[in-house]
Amino acid sequence: MNNVQCVCNFREDDSFKSSDDFHNHKNFVLKSEIFTTIEVKTFFSANNIETWHKCNTCFKVWRLVKPDVPFRGDWSVVPEIEL
Ligand SMILES: [Zn+2]
């Protein structure tokens, strides 16, 4: 399945404008039936809080990394090599 068309690819930004932006997105991901939260295998950074969320449709894994100013966080597909 083409990930661009998948329901999991709904967010335009791969970072967060604010703490509220991050928390709103995280709350949506956690309560949504789009994703299943799975164990983190490879951390983006040892210094940031990170969770992984697997799409129930295309099975791509998304990483959600909490912002820590000036770092604006990350919401991106985990490369297969890191899975
Ligand atoms: Zn998907």
Image (cartoon, grey):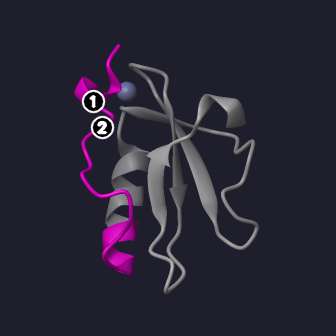
Q: State whether label 2 is within 8 Å of ligand 1.
A: yes
Q: Visible in this render: residue 37?
A: yes
First to last magenta residue range: 1-22
Left or right, 11 with respect to 43, comes to left
Residues tagged 1 and 2 counted as in contact (Cβ below 8 A): yes
Task: Check residue 9 in the rendering and tell me which mark sits there, or answer none.
Answer: 2
User: Are there few (<14), some (14-19), or many (20+) residues within 10 Å of tag 2?
Assistant: some
Residue in view at x 35 percent, y 13 percent: 1
Residue type at numbered disc 1? Val
Residue 15 location, x and y as percent?
Answer: 38, 64
Q: Which residue is mark 1?
A: 4
Q: Quadrant of the C terminus?
A: top right
- Numbered circle sitting on residue 21: none
Q: Position of residue 43 (x, y in %)?
A: 71, 54
Q: Compared with residue 59, is residue 52 higher up or lower down, i.e. above or below?
A: below
Rendering quadrant holding ligand 1: top left
Counting other residues with Cα less than 10 Å from the Cα at mark 1, is it few (<14), some (14-19), or many (20 or more)? few
Tell me which corner region of the image, top left, top right, bottom left or bottom right, holds residue 5: top left
Q: Does the rendering let one see residue 83?
A: no
Q: Residue furthest top?
A: 1
Quarter occupied by residue 16? bottom left
Location of residue 47 with respect to 2 vertically, above or below: below
* Predominant SS of the magenta segment: loop
Specify whether 7 is left or right of 14: left
| Residue 51 higher or lower than 37, as above or below | below
Residue reaching furthest to the bottom: 69
Q: Indicate which disc, 1 or 2, sits on the residue closer to the N terminus.
A: 1
State which mark lies toward you, 1 or 2.
Answer: 1
Drawn side of residue 32 relative to residue 55, left or right: left
Quarter of image, res 21: bottom left
| Residue type, mark 2 in image | Asn
Q: Quick one: SS at disc 2?
A: loop
